[in-house]
Amino acid sequence: MSEKIQKILARAGKGSRREMEKAISDGRVSLNGTVCALGERATEHDEIRIDGHIVKFKSENDIPCRVLIYNKPLSEVCTRNDPEQRKTVFDRLPILKQGRWIAVGRLDINTTGLLIFTTDGELANKLMHPSHEVEREYAVRVFGEVTDNTIQALRQGVQLEDGPAKFNKISFAGGEGINRWYHVTISEGRNREVRRMWESQEVQVSRLSRIRYGDIELPRTLPMGGWAELEVKEVNYLRKLVNMKPIEMRKEVGRNNKIKNLKANRIRKAIRKSELREQGVKPANKRRRKGS
């Protein structure tokens, strides 16, 4: 079956459908060696290029919509290839036979917590679009004096260099003196927005972790650097948020890495094996001998 080229490019993670429509209108996309026009369709047997680069893709029915959650540690960067050779959030993810993992948004290098990855580029782009206003919740430890006026200002809105911003909710979560924890929610994903809002009130953020995205929460049993696959019900919740049709079946990434089956010790062992491989050390094989 053929599909519109802008839909194929969006699913491949090249941008939103609207952005791909503009790319086609600007003459940046070719079909089988000829610059294509808006409205043209293609199949998996055709060659599509954007800005001269071949786009690898399969038909929609051949690529199951997979979604992972990942507990990002400190010092990992949200990029596929880092020129400074730092660890990236993609390093520990399972290898795919087809397609690739696409990050839904970013966390800066000093922020930990919940990241979402999917194989569906269209889903990723729609979730990241500000028009859908998906609520995110963060746990924040701040250093400095936080008064009632501070809280009121952050609730009502503060002016940042890229426009006004406010927390939808803000609640005290523990701590004493000038080191206190708060839980805050926002519906945007601007760069360093949570940190900048606190800094506008002369309060420094000493720790920041994302703990919820929409209704998807970071499980307490998922260790730093661990990942887990969402159930179909949760995948369809995310798809419904952005008005995409539900899925019924898909191939699994791993039988034991579903959220309901999370076992922290097993995942920590998998993380340790990954670290050993990065160091060039072959993990020991601890298979038991027969009759032992």
Image (cartoon, rainbow, N blue to C red):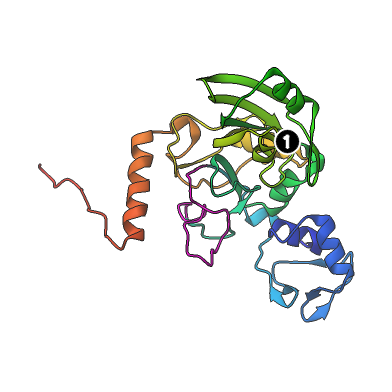
Image quarter for residue 127?
top right
- Determine the residue positioned at 30% across, 63% down: 280
Left or right of 253, for residue 62: right
Dominant SS in magenta = loop
Farthest residue, direction left: 292
User: Which percent across, then down, holds residue 42?
Assistant: 78, 67
Q: Is residue 224 left or right of 170 when viewed as pictured?
A: left
- Say above or below: 261 vs 18: above
State the residue at coordinates (80%, 26%). Answer: 156
Q: Position of residue 158 (x, y in %)?
A: 78, 33
Query: x, y percentage for residue 166?
Result: 76, 31
- Residue located beneath label 1 in the image: 134
In the figure, 125 relative to 241: above or below? below
Q: Which residues are magenta?
A: 71-94
Quadrant of residue 36 within the rendered picture: bottom right
57 or 21: nearer the viewer? 21
Circle 1 SS class: loop
Circle 1 packing at 10 Å, graded few (<14), some (14-19), many (20+), is some
Q: Which is more toward the observer, 17 or 189?
A: 189
Dot 1 amino acid type? Val
Instruction: Please give the name of the residue rendered at 53% of the width and 45% of the height, measured from the top-left corner.
Output: 110
Q: Nearer the viewer, residue 134 or 65?
A: 134
Q: Residue 164: within the magenta? A: no
Q: Is residue 77 visible?
A: yes
Q: Is residue 240 above or below residue 80?
A: above
Magenta stretch: includes residue 90 = yes
Rendering quarter of residue 157: top right
